[in-house]
Image (tube, helix red, strand yellow):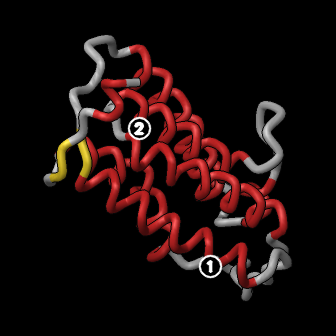
């Protein structure tokens, strides 16, 4: 626990790459047109939506600006990479299936909202590995809100 509290406030490249990697498929999503896109309706309420948005921004800032000495073992980033790979595979399936949003909503490996759960697991493991306590705490809030909102999302 003491190592998690040994953090520095400065820009961190590992934090930058940690944030950037899960965003790559989202960049493609933003520029590739979908015949299925409609306005999504959130049924979770403005409070949940606003909490998720605020936590998302704070998590990104936390990864970019806080760092500690990361673990010498690479077990945590390998497991995080596995979750990221599953996330990428679901995105790949989405693009192969002509951007059908149902592909993103279907359960995967018993996960009810894999496109919400997988990146949260990835970020949690990376925050642990990077000894980034501020991001770890914010991720708990973001994870609860993101998974809740993803389950409540109706298109």
Residue at image point 27% right, 46% down: 15
Residue at image point 69% right, 81% down: 37
Q: Is residue 115 left or right of residue 69?
A: right
Question: Foreground: 144 or 2?
Answer: 2
Counting from the top left corner in percent of width and height, residue 101 is at 73, 66
Instruction: Identify whether 36 is placed above or below 135.
Output: below
Counting from the top left corner in percent of width and height, residue 38 is at 73, 86
Counting from the top left corner in percent of width and height, residue 148 is at 77, 60
Residue for badge 2: 127
Q: Is residue 31 left or right of residue 64?
A: right
Q: Secondary structure at mark 2?
A: helix
Mark 1 or 2, nearer chain start: 1
Q: Is residue 118 left or right of residue 28?
A: right
- Quadrant housing residue 50: bottom right
| Spatial separation of the CA atoms under disc 1 and disc 2 | 23 Å
Residue at image point 58% right, 52% down: 91
Considering every residue shown, the one lying at the far left of the view is: 10
Instruction: Identify whether 101 is placed above or below 43.
Output: above
Q: Is residue 101 left or right of residue 68?
A: right
Residue for badge 1: 50
Answer few, some or many: residues within 10 Å of disc 2's Cα (few below 14, many 20 plus, some between 14 and 19).
Answer: many
């Amino acid at each position: 626990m003491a190592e998690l509290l040994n953090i520095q406030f400065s820009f961190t490249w590992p934090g930058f790459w940690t944030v950037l990697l899960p965003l790559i498929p989202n960049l493609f999503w933003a520029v590739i047109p979908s015949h299925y896109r409609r306005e999504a309706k959130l049924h979770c309420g403005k409070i949940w939506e606003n909490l998720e948005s605020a936590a998302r921004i704070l998590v990104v800032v936390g990864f970019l600006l806080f760092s500690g000495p990361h673990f010498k073992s690479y077990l945590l980033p390998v497991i995080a990479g596995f979750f990221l790979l599953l996330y990428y595979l679901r995105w790949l399936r989405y693009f192969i299936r002509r951007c059908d949003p149902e592909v993103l909503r279907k359960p995967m490996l018993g996960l009810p909202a894999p496109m919400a759960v997988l990146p949260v697991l990835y970020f949690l493991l990376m925050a642990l590995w990077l000894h980034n306590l501020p991001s770890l705490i914010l991720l708990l809030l973001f994870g609860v809100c993101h998974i809740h909102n993803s389950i409540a999302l109706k298109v």
